Structures are given as structure tokens and as C-alpha cells.
Image (cartoon, coloured by chain):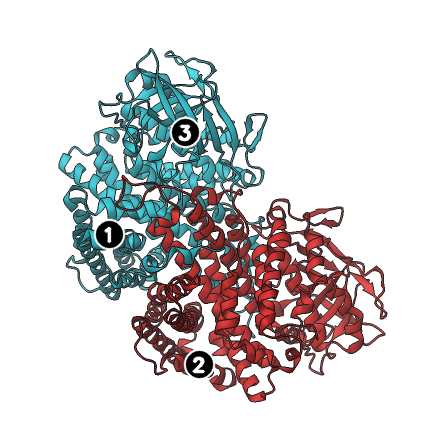
Chain colours: A red, B cyan
């Protein structure tokens, strides 16, 4: 099967739904981008995803990265494609904040979605370099930027984020990698082990620039004691030349369920006491506190939304293959017509149901994601500082929703794609099972689903006295209660109102749990994930209803034989399907949360031990 | 990590919950089995699963079956373990109906569960041989039984079921493999291709006995025209000796997402016109109708329940590993205690929630499964013919519920096990990701999830004028409405009643759709899967509540320091968790079904095509 992707949908988002023209008016973009740039950019990006990026995806899975005699060999094509994307403006340089050649997130991410869908592994390597470049742009001195950025951005070098250690995963504050001062106040010796480092040694680049979290001598305990260090695999002089190794040793690669194209690396820093890192940001304060993790978290909104986006792109690719198969494969007869002709799979109601399920959910989650990017574009670029601050706050609410709900849904939808194909979907001859395996990691990295949920109920509900969360709720409420004439979507609006009320109720309940913290505190984590689902489903439904209203207007305007009419009818179907078939989950979950069953707390731990 | 399994739970099912003593009183068992046989059998089976069967599981995944120069090489140990199980009474001979050494299903399946959990691939090879042996026992003449059974049962030979063809999967009636009469009225020439044949060539046995569906010349169209033929890979003479090949050629093996230990084979029969098969059952009637598929379906109740059981066993194994990890791994601090000591994962509320989720769902589904086996044991062995018939009918209702709900839930729970482990769960160093991959096929083979749902609403709802379904409903209703004194489970009984009413409502709705068939027929398949979920969740909840009542009684009787008290408290927790946290799905789904949204039907097919 051929890699196909729903470009029409991306155009709808950028040209018919979001206020893209507003974003393009910002100083950074107005002189060289306008609405007419969108179509050609998307067409070209699609061509590249199809012809250059997707062809390496299956062999990356099959062959994987090899590690022999300390050297990593990437699967065929990975080096070339990584460099192609970086060199031709389809990678980090187009995404980096503040760079002149940068695109607005809403546009860059539309392009990037195609590469994430076409080959998640190579797209994630690019993404890591972008993250490192963005850290250096935000927090590095001019000299540092000059030293590292050019080769990170042109594809010569790879960037990585080194947080996890054998002893510290989700609890990153327990990291034991150490840093020691040297004669140069900017340079520290680094010593420790890191694991699960994506792209930690890809074999695709001449150098790897690691951003390493480490605790300086005398550093505070926990995450506030961690500093952030630029640790190149080969040391880079101020003039950008590379000299000798920097005592960063690749110990091995993880064998994983999927994402075999991505080298998940175990690294030792300073095994021979000869590893040096350049401190990013300020030295520890008098209490031993550093801003290492805080700097990394500065990028977190975008990169967590990016992870949810990656998941949704993979689910969309799987949907696309399932749709192709279902419209081509002839099998069986429709329900109640056992004597009839054999038909395409899509003519079986349950297959069509699964396809619309995938369509509606991926479209809805994509809409939520792009609304999140739009909020970030405004926050980053708007001259209206108040609006920027407000939108940044709302984007903070979006972040855990997108990351968690996007990745958890991808797990369901990639499995559903296999189900559409049936037995062949389980084989490696068809691409869908790879998406199920590749996407599973996304509920774990960049903070597990629970960490997202905890971020929502533990932090986002109450940050800045609850103002951002209230702003987020108001955005939804304003849309729902807008005065509009009765429409074909009346039933759906009424369901959406009911579901929105659930958000208000659950939020109040959480407020009351915080007020009675000692008595109720265990309920906060217990219902966190389900609370996140309630908020996510309402947000997704709201986005789909916004889009459906646009579609409805178009349908009333277009002639009945217009080629695009089915597209808009499909948008209505997505909204109706989601609101009637998925959104009731939010209402059910709210009922469960309000019921506040305590069986998990009451269950003796011993009853969960198998001996 | 070590393979551990919850034997205590199997003992509870057999010794404290089900009327096992009633089954053991049947003529077939009463002379050589009694309640005291259960513990030693389970202990011995556990030892074998742990020490002999599980050790081959990971290497089967890693190495898989190799196919070179027409020869299949199994992964290390598969041959030995297959033979060990068959030769020592842990395989087909213990499961076969009507055999003297046979065990009741409820006991055999408790043993078998351990092997399915320990190594799904080898257990499924055994299972296929059992299926073939059972077909021969039910439908074969004495001579045929003598010729084939001994070596099938002693592990020398492997059995297979050959239904699927490149052109016919779920629509098995479209099979085009042909059979042609020869001079011997019992012997036919066979010609055609079969694919996805599990254990079609394992390299573990000296011969393979294929049960092949093929259409005789002049056979009716569709499934009623298919005959069933015994096609040995090496021809077997009447005295049981094997001679020459029988023109059955292995074309290749499928590369799959999981279950690599199982050889999924593409076979050509009669490529050189020299393939012979022995007809099972009668020759086609004057309308060209044969009973081939009907004979295979005769085994379907048990083998579909078996597939759901296999899925639940894998989910249970994944749960067991997750539980082990969570009780051993120290990470992070409990909610609200950021200054406290680091604790085991299980002390984090959300981890504990996931563990109880896995415990409750696997226990509940296991209970449903064993109730199904009990019904079959009575149906097969009871002298009370009326009861036998009634129970057989109820077992027919259980069949699609167990197959579909069991396998769909396993997909969720094996993913949840990965989530408990976090990043390491995604690696091949830990066994949980293999269970997620291995179990995914179970929503597809033996009839996809939709085929099960269609079986329920299209056939089982109305078969025998609806009597078996009414009997099934009555069984649940009788339990719920039994007069019992108010208990700690009051809230749960009230929820269960509400959910049970949903079953009645959905059933009535379906009745009305059938009454207005022309107008409503599309709704029947559209809501089939969700209807199956409603029924399944109510059945599972009912089983858990039955068990909880027993546990409650035990708790009131046991001294407070009794070693087994936590086990019973855990049973209460499972029931409460399931009813409060999972069963609300049934109520929600019923609401969705009654809402009967038509977006799937209204959506233009063109809107589902990605171009």
C-alpha cells in the first residue's frame, strides 16, 4: 500500500478554521509568509513525506539500529533522510523559536505531521535536535549559540535530552549523575549514567550534543538541585571545530517493542573522569538550587503537545492505510444480503463504523492540537502582552490533555486499524501493526499518562489562583452558549452542554478535595487520569463542533454537485459521531468520579501480590 | 522476573465458587477424580508451567520459526515442550471429549490456563491438535479414530484447521479450494491454497494432520457447500503407518506482530494433483450441501471460549509481572509527601489503581469463562437431558461474550501492564510487551470481534425463539433479585440492577429493530459490538458479585489474623472496583445504543477515502 495522507484536513485547519491570517501578521512572519504560502508548502511537504521519508520506515523497523564494537549503524536511509530534512528547511530550523527562517507552529507542525506519520523514528530524531537548539536559543549566550547552532541546524549534528537514569525515571529529581567544577567557571566535569536516551548515538551524524541533567557538588536534593550541561560527544572548541572524544561512551542500545529506527541508548559520562560539560544558565545559588530542570521544562508545553501530535499522526497514518485497504479489498456481503454480490470492506457497517471512529477521533484530537499550537503562536509572538499571557496560560491547560489523551487514543486507534485489516493487519506485510508498536511508547515518554493527569489536577487546576483553568473553561463555555439559530446539530450541542457541566462539577469536586486535603487527598491522584479524560473529551468535542458549524455553512452555500461537498459532510459526520459515541464517556467518567469509589484505597496491598 | 501465577484464584473458582463436586459426580469422572485431586493437579501443573513451559516463551518470540529450503525449524525447546505436554497428560488427551482419561473442562482448563499464560504459542499448538482429535472423536468412524488418534494424542503428530484462503477470510463460505472424487468413495483429491494456518508446519512433529474445508465438484455455493477432509501431510495407511508425501507443500511462514513461536503457514494442497483427503462425515446431498463447516462449528463454543480464555490468561500473566515489578521497584514518593522516603511503585495510588484494574478485570472475565466451561461440562455430561440442553443453550450465549470481551480486554490490560513498568515495559528485557503483541491476534482469529457481536445479536438473540437468551437473562436476574439481607455491597447491587435493566432494554430495542427490519436493519450491525459489551460487562459483574458474597461470608468467619483474609478482602475489592468503575460503561453504552445516532450510516463513503 502507498503512503497517503489527508492533506485536505490540514488545509481546512489552516485556511478555513484557525485565524491563521492573524498569526501571519506578526512581525516575525509578515514579510515573507502569507496565506498563499500554505498550499505549496503542504504539497511539497507531502511529496517529501511520501517519496523520501516513508520509504525508510518499514526497513527501519525490520533492520533497526545495530551496535557492534561500540559503534552504532543506523538502518538504511536514516542518515540521508535526517540530513535531507535538516538541510532543506523541513526540520529544526523551521521550528526553532526566534529564528528568522522559523515558521509559525501551526504551519510548521502541519508539515511536521506528515513526517511523523511517514516515519516516526526519523521525525523524533529531528525533534530532539530542535529541542536542544531551542534550549540554546533561549538560554545560551551568543558565543554558545554560534558554537553549536549552525551544525545542529544543518544536520551535521544530533541533539539529545539526557534525563533518565537507571535509578530515576518518572522521579527525575532522584538523578545521581554529578557535575564537578573545574578552573573554568563555565565548564564542569560530568560523571554518571543515563539510559533511555533517544538518539543518544544514531550513527547518522558527525557529533552528538547531549543536554545532561546533573547535580553539582553541594547541589540541593530533588529536582531543584539539578543543573543543565551541554555535553558534546566530541568536544567542540569555541570556533566550532571538533577535537578528540569527550569521554561519553555508548554502552548499548535498548531492544524495544517498536520504534526500532530510533536508537535508544545507554550512555556513560565520565567513566575515565574526562567528560566535560558547559553549564547552561546560572551557577547554583547559595542554597544549591539550579534551574536545569526548569530550563528543560520551558520547552515542555510544546514538546508534550508534540508527543501527543506524534501519536495522533501515527494513528492518522494507520487510519489512512486502513481506509485504503477497506476501499480496495472485496470481501463478504452486506448485512441482510447473503445472496448479493461481494462488496468492498467499507460497505460493511461495522468496518465503516471503525473508519469513522478513527476519522472522528484523529480529526478531533488534531483540532485540539492545532488550537494548542495557535495559542502558543500567539503567546510567543503577539504584541498584545496581556493576550499573550492569557493564551500561554490556556496552552498550559492544553498540554497534558494533548499529551495524554492523544497518546492513549493512538493506542486504541492503531489497534482498530489492525482490526479493519483483519489477519493481514497482524502481519508485517502491512504497515499498520508497526504503528501500534511504534506509538505505544508515547504514553510513557515525556511524562507518563499519569504524570500528565497529575500535572492537570495537581498543578494546572490551581496555578495562578486558577485563572488559566477558568480561562480555558470560559473559552469552551462561550462557544457552547453562543446564541445561534437552531441547527441540525441541536442534539449534539445539548450533549456537549451536559458534558461541559461535568467539567465544572468535577473541578468543584477537586476544589472540595483540596479544601479537605487531609481527609480526601488520596482521591486526587485516584481520579486524576479520568478527570483528564473528561476535560480532553469535552475539548475535542468543542473543536469538532466549531468545525462542523463551518462545514454546515459551506454545505448550504455549495452547489449539490460540488466536488468538495462530501468532505464537508464528512466533517459533520465526525462531529456527530464523536459527540454521540465518544463524548458520553466524559459524562460517565464524571459520574464515576463523583461516586468516588474507594476500592483501590481499601484493597490490601497484599491482595495485589502474586506469589 | 520469574513467572508467577495466581493459583489461589483457580482454587477459589474450583473449590469455593463453582459446584465442582456436582461435575465430579458425573459417570465419566466419578471413579477416578474427587475434590482432593484439584490441589495436587494445580500444583503440579504450576510447576510445569514455571519450569518447563515458560522458559521457552521469550526465545520463541526472539528467534521465531525459520523457513529455509521448504523446511521449518522451530525455536529451541518448542518440540520438546509440545511433546512433553502431550505425552504426560497435560495436553490434548486430558481435554478431549469422551476419552476416558479426559478431565472436566473446568479442571482441565484451569491447568491449561497456566500453559497459555506461560507460553501462548505452544499452548495454541496443543489446542489445535485437541480440536482435530475432538472432530475425529465426534464425527470419525472407528477405523479413522484408530488410525489417527493415538499419534495425535501422544505428541508425535500435530493437528490443524484449514479454513482461511487468500480470497476468503471472515467470509469462509467463499473458499475456492476444491475436492474431487476418486474411485474410493471416502477419498477425495484436494486442490487449493490455504493461508494463516496456525501450526501448519511446526517442525516439531513427524506428521501434520490437516482438517481442510473444500468444495466438492457440484457443491452448493457458500458455506453449506463445503466438505471437511482429513489431509495428512504424509499419507497414513489404515494400520497407522506413514508412507510418502501427500502433495501438501509449505509455501512460507507469515511474519507477524507477535506469537512468533507459532508457525503461521501458507500451504498448497495438490499443486501436483497428488493430494488426497479422507472425507469426514457424509457425502454431499442431492443439493450439493455438505456439513463440513457445521462439523467444525460443533467445536466452536469451546474453542471460542478457549480463545477468550487464552487472551485472559495472557492478560493475567502480564498483570502478574506488573504486580511483581510494582512491589519490588522503588521509585518516587507518595502523593503529598515530597519530602518522604522513596517507596515501592505499588504505593503510588495510580499504580495501585492499574493493578486493581487488571486484577478485577482478569478475575471477572476468568469467572465468566469458568462459568461457561461449567455450563459445557453439564451440557456434555449430565444425565438430566433437559438441564443439559438448557445449559448448552446458555453456553451458546456465553461463547461470543467470552471470545470478544476477553480478547478486547486483554489488549487493554496488556498495554496497562506496560504502563505500570514504564519505559522498561517497552523493552524486550521485560516480558510484558510480548504479551501485548502475542494477544492482539485473539481479537481476530476464531472470528473477529464483530463476528462475535453479529453472532450474538444476529443469531443468539433469536435462536430457538429466544429461549436460550431468556434463560441467560433469567440466570442473572435471579441472582440479582435474590432476597438477601442488606450488605456492604448494597451500592454495588443497585448499580448491577441498573446495568441489568440496560440488557433488557437493549434486547427489546433489538427486537423492535427486527420487527421493522427494512427500516432499521442497518442499526443491527452498527450497535452489535456495543451490545455485546453491555451483555459481557453485566455478566462479568454478576460473576464477581457472586464471588464477593462468598468472600464476605468468609471474612465474617475468619479470625482477624488469618493468613487468607487479605485474599478475600481482595475479592471484595475486585467486585467493588469492577461494578463502580467498569460496569458504568454498560449503562453508558446502552444510552448510546438507545440514542441510535446514524452518523456512520449518513457519512458519505467518499469522506472516508484518503486520496
Residue A302 visible to an observer of this rendering: no
Tell me where residue A445 appears, x and y as whole percent. Answer: 57, 62
Q: Rounded to the nearest whole Å, what is the CA distance between mark 3 and mark 2?
A: 60 Å
Q: Are marks 2 and 1 on the same chain?
A: no
Using the image as rendered, state which of residue A455 and residue B48 is in the foreground: A455
Identify residue for label 1: B521
Label of residue A246 in the image: none
Question: Disc 1: which chain?
Answer: B
CB contact under 8 Å: marks 3 and 2: no
Is B260 located above or below residue B243 in the figure?
Answer: below
Q: In the image, what residue occupies the spot 43% across and 38% down?
A: B115
Question: Disc 3: which chain?
Answer: B
- Look at the numbered disc 2 and give the secondary structure of its residue: helix
The image quadrant of residue B589 is: bottom left
Question: Disc 2: which chain?
Answer: A
Is A360 located above or below residue A36 in the figure?
Answer: above
Sequence-wise, the earlier of marks 1 and 3 is 3
Left or right of residue B259, residue B562 in this image:
left
Tell us which disc is closer to us: 2 or 1.
1
Classify mark 3: residues with Cα within 10 Å, few (<14), some (14-19) or many (20+). Answer: many
Identify residue for label 2: A475
Tell us which disc is closer to us: 3 or 2.
2
Identify residue for label 3: B160
Classify mark 2: residues with Cα within 10 Å, few (<14), some (14-19) or many (20+). Answer: some
Left or right of residue A516, residue B18 in this image:
left
Q: In the image, what residue occupies the spot 77% across and 78% down?
A: A141
CB contact under 8 Å: marks 1 and 3: no
Tell us which disc is closer to us: 1 or 3.
1
Using the image as rendered, state which of residue B415 and residue A574 is in the foreground: A574
Q: Rounded to the nearest whole Å, what is the CA distance between mark 1 and mark 3?
A: 37 Å
- Look at the numbered disc 1 and give the secondary structure of its residue: loop
Amino acid at each position: 500500500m502507498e503512503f497517503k495522507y489527508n492533506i485536505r484536513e490540514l488545509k481546512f485547519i489552516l485556511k478555513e478554521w484557525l485565524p491563521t491570517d492573524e498569526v501571519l501578521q506578526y512581525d516575525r512572519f509578515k514579510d515573507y509568509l502569507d496565506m498563499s504560502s500554505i498550499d505549496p508548502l503542504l504539497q511539497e511537504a507531502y511529496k517529501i513525506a511520501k517519496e523520501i521519508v516513508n520509504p525508510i520506515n518499514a526497513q527501519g523497523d525490520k533492520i533497526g539500529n545495530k551496535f557492534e564494537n561500540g559503534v552504532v549503524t543506523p538502518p538504511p536511509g536514516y542518515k540521508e533522510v535526517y540530513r535531507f530534512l535538516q538541510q532543506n528547511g523541513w526540520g529544526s530550523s523551521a521550528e526553532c523559536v526566534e529564528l528568522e527562517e522559523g515558521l509559525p507552529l501551526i504551519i510548521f507542525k502541519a508539515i511536521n505531521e506528515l513526517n511523523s506519520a511517514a516515519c516516526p523514528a526519523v521525525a523524533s530524531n529531528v525533534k530532539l535536535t530542535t529541542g536542544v537548539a531551542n534550549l540554546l536559543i533561549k538560554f545560551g549566550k551568543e558565543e554558545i549559540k554560534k558554537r553549536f547552532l549552525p551544525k545542529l541546524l544543518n544536520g551535521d549534528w544530533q541533539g539529545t535530552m539526557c534525563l533518565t537514569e537507571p535509578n530515576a525515571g518518572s522521579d527525575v529529581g532522584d538523578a545521581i549523575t554529578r557535575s564537578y567544577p573545574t578552573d573554568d567557571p563555565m565548564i564542569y566535569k560530568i560523571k554518571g549514567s543515563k539510559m533511555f536516551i533517544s538518539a543518544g548515538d544514531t550513527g547518522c551524524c558527525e557529533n552528538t550534543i547531549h543536554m545532561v541533567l546533573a547535580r553539582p557538588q553541594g547541589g540541593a536534593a530533588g529536582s531543584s538541585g539539578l543543573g543543565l550541561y551541554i555535553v558534546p560527544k566530541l568536544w567542540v572548541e569555541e570556533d566550532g571545530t571538533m577535537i578528540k572524544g569527550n569521554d561519553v561512551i555508548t554502552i548499548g542500545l535498548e531492544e524495544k517493542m517498536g520504534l526500532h529506527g530510533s536508537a535508544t541508548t545507554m550512555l556513560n559520562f565520565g567513566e575515565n573522569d574526562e567528560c566535560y560539560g558547559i553549564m547552561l544558565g546560572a551557577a547554583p545559588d547559595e542554597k544549591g538550587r539550579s534551574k536545569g530542570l526548569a530550563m528543560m521544562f520551558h520547552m515542555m508545553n510544546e514538546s508534550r503537545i508534540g508527543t501527543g501530535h506524534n501519536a495522533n499522526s501515527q494513528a492518522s497514518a494507520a487510519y489512512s492505510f486502513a481506509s485504503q485497504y477497506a476501499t480496495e479489498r472485496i470481501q463478504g456481503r452486506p448485512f441482510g444480503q447473503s445472496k448479493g454480490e461481494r462488496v468492498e470492506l467499507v460497505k460493511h457497517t461495522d468496518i465503516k463504523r471503525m473508519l469513522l471512529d478513527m476519522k472522528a477521533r484523529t480529526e478531533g484530537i488534531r483540532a485540539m492540537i492545532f488550537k494548542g499550537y495557535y495559542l502558543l503562536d500567539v503567546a510567543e509572538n503577539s504584541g498584545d502582552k496581556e493576550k499573550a499571557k492569557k493564551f500561554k496560560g490556556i496552552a498550559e491547560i492544553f498540554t497534558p490533555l494533548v499529551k495524554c489523551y492523544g497518546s492513549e487514543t493512538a493506542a486504541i486507534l492503531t489497534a482498530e486499524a489492525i482490526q479493519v485489516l483483519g489477519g493481514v493487519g497482524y502481519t508485517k506485510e502491512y504497515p499498520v501493526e508497526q504503528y501500534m508498536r511504534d506509538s505505544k511508547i508515547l504514553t510513557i515518554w515525556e511524562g507518563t499518562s499519569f504524570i500528565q493527569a497529575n500535572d492537570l489536577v495537581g498543578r494546572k487546576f490551581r496555578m495562578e489562583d486558577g485563572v488559566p483553568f477558568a480561562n480555558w473553561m470560559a473559552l469552551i463555555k462561550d462557544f457552547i452558549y453562543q446564541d445561534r439559530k437552531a441547527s441540525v446539530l441541536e442534539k449534539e450541542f445539548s450533549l456537549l452542554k451536559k458534558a461541559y457541566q461535568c467539567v465544572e462539577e468535577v473541578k468543584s469536586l477537586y476544589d472540595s478535595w483540596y479544601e479537605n486535603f487531609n481527609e480526601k487527598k488520596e482521591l486526587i491522584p485516584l481520579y486524576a487520569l479520568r478527570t483528564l479524560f473528561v476535560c480532553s473529551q469535552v475539548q475535542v468535542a468543542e473543536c469538532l463542533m466549531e468545525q462542523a458549524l463551518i462545514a454546515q455553512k459551506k454545505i448550504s452555500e455549495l452547489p449539490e454537485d460540488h466536488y468538495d461537498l462530501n468532505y464537508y459532510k464528512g466533517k459533520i459526520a465526525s462531529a456527530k459521531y464523536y459527540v454521540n459515541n465518544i463524548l458520553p464517556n466524559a459524562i460517565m467518567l464524571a459520574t464515576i468520579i463523583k461516586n468516588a469509589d474507594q476500592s483501590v484505597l481499601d484493597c490490601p496491598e497484599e491482595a495485589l501480590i502474586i506469589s
